[in-house]
Image (spheres, grey):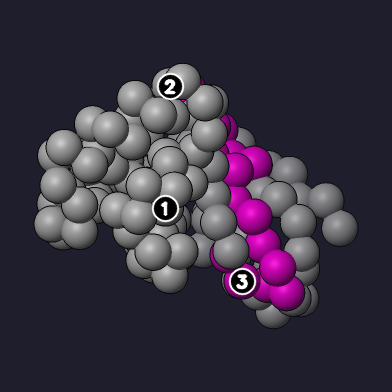
Amino acid sequence: MALRGTLEDFGLANVFQIIGQTSKTGTLVMRDRDEEVKLYFEAGGIVRCEASRRQRSELLGTMLRRAEAITEAQLTAALEAQKASRKRLGDCLIAQAAISATDLQEFARLQTSETVFRVFLWRQGTY
């Protein structure tokens, strides 16, 4: 089933309800004038998301620092490793033993939730 429409005509809560009730697996791509967000679903539940632009507060490094899960020095080292290797920041932090894979999963879930909450504030956009 392909869902297409605008948020003005059919709200995001309704789209999520359809996906959840029908236990769909796939990707919901939403766009507004400035951003694209991809939500990945498995069996009707959100498992992760990607955003073309994240607010600073939604960046993984910012979230980990705010929670005091890593130090500024660990973040700086991981960002340098990320730049050199083109790996994801979380993978660099795990490789440096700054965080565990379990912690990364928890913060990734939190990051996804923050992005989804923000997208719910959109009044215009397409999916």
Query: Which disc number belongs to residue 83?
Result: 2
Name the amino acid type tagged 3. Answer: Gly
CA gap between label 3 and label 1 equals 26 Å
Quarter of the rendering occupied by the C terminus? top right
Give the labeled residue for mark 1.
94
The single residue placed furthest to the right in the displayed view is 1
Amino acid carrying mark 1 in the image? Ile
Q: CA distance from mark 2 to mark 1?
A: 15 Å
- Circle 3 residue: 45
Mark with earlier residue (3, 1): 3
Report the mark closest to the observer, 2 or 3.
Answer: 2
Mark 2 and mark 1 lie on one chain; the one further toward the N terminus is: 2
In the image, taking residue 40 as reference, residue 121 lies left or right, namely left
Are there few (<14), some (14-19), or many (20+) residues within 10 Å of tag 1? some
Q: Residue at x 51, y 63 (%)?
A: 13
Asked whether the beta carbons under mark 2 and mark 3 sit within 8 Å of each other, the answer is no
**Residue 109 in view of the camera:** no
Q: Residue at x 55, y 56 (%)?
A: 48
Q: Amino acid at mark 2?
A: Lys
